[in-house]
Image (tube, rainbow, N blue to C red):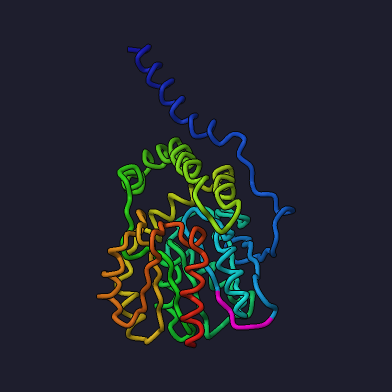
């Protein structure tokens, strides 16, 4: 019996050690190499950049679950050529922003956004551009602070319908063991997908390498799982209906072949907000904000010209 207990103890020790070993060699991003600025906000340090002219109307861009703010490079430059100043920033645990422990729910992300807006003196007439999970954050902000909003622009937004595989659903729902399995397997799964996408067309050179670099920073996978359990677990029907009642102009742009936020979400949003303007980018997947940036910019420019 003693040897059985000893063996079980050894197996347990190995299982506990695996995630620790996998974290060896991970490095925090080097701020000396960063472009942009850093703000000491209430929850932690946030990296942000202004793209476009020194003066002009402002668009605040919020990226998604696993993509740093660099994913907006081509879209921000395109809007900048139209005269808009675009503020991009890294969510906590991504890009050059600090890793912050704890639940990553709507209050967590809204606090970061509110802090940054205050830091930059942006208080009203806000135009928010949210991509993927950033779309859910932007939607939650617009519903909570309608008096501060001018326009809401969404690209493949979560909060309506998101496709998850069995691994993602299980690790999200199961505490402790789900955390362990995510720590052991998620990096390899994400790396394989990114390497497979390396040859795909993109208008943001180096974006796949930037996403691969995210996987090499401590705390990134923990942030991803915390967001799946928090912000991404929320359905935002009430928020979209409130935005419609408050007459906040909305444009939603979808990828025709998106396998993460499926095109059928367009129909769901139409029932929640009948005044929302909706467009589809042909042959675009979930990465359309960088793979089809020119098409996205063209649609956004059309809406912005109507302002």
| Residue 229 horizontal/vertical position (percent) | 38, 54
Vertical placement of residue 188 versus 29, above or below = above
User: Does the magenta segment cover residue 62?
Assistant: no
- Residue at coordinates 48% horizontally, 62% vertically from top-left? 292
Asked whether, in this view, residue 87 is left or right of residue 267, the answer is: right
Vertical placement of residue 106 versus 197, above or below = below
- Residue at coordinates 63% horizontally, 65% vertically from top-left? 48
Front one among 202 and 72: 202
For the N terminus, which image quadrant?
top left
| Rendering quarter of residue 8 | top left
| Residue 181 horizontal/vertical position (percent) | 40, 37
| Residue 303 horizontal/vertical position (percent) | 46, 81
Vertical placement of residue 236 versus 274, above or below = above
- Residue at coordinates 49% horizontally, 34% vertically from top-left? 19
Front one among 296 and 71: 296
Vertical placement of residue 144 versus 219, above or below = below
Q: What stretch of residues is rendered in magenta?
A: 55-59
Front one among 208 and 30: 208
| Residue 185 horizontal/vertical position (percent) | 43, 36
| Rendering quarter of residue 81 | bottom right
User: Does the magenta segment cover residue 56?
Assistant: yes
Main SS class of the magenta portion in the image: loop
- Residue at coordinates 40% horizontally, 84% vertically from top-left? 248
């Amino acid at each position: 019996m003693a040897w059985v207990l000893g063996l079980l103890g050894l197996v347990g020790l190995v299982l506990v050690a695996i995630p620790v070993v996998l974290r060896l060699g991970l490095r925090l991003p080097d701020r000396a190499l960063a472009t942009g600025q850093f703000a000491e906000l209430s929850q932690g340090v946030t990296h942000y950049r202004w793209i476009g002219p020194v003066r002009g109307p402002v668009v605040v861009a919020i990226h998604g679950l696993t993509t740093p703010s660099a994913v907006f490079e081509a879209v921000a430059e395109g809007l900048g050529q139209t005269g808009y100043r675009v503020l991009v920033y890294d969510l906590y645990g991504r890009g050059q922003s600090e890793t912050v422990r704890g639940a990553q729910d709507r209050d967590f992300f809204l606090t970061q956004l509110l802090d940054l807006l205050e830091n930059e003196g942006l208080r009203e007439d806000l135009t928010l551009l949210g991509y993927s999970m950033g779309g859910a954050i932007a939607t939650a902000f617009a519903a909570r602070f309608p008096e501060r909003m001018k326009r809401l622009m969404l690209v493949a937004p979560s909060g309506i319908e998101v496709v998850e595989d069995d691994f993602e659903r299980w690790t999200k729902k199961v505490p402790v063991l789900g955390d362990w399995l995510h720590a052991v397997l998620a990096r390899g799964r994400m790396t394989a997908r990114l390497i497979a996408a390396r040859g795909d067309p993109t208008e943001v050179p180096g974006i796949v390498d930037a996403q691969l670099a995210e996987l090499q920073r401590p705390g990134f996978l923990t942030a991803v799982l915390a967001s799946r359990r928090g912000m991404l677990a929320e359905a935002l029907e009430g928020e979209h209906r409130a935005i419609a009642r408050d007459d906040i102009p909305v444009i939603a742009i979808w990828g025709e072949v998106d396998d993460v936020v499926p095109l059928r979400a367009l129909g769901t949003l139409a029932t929640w907000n009948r005044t929302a303007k909706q467009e589809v980018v042909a042959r675009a997947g979930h990465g359309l904000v960088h793979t089809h940036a020119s098409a996205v910019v063209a649609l956004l420019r059309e809406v912005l010209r109507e302002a």
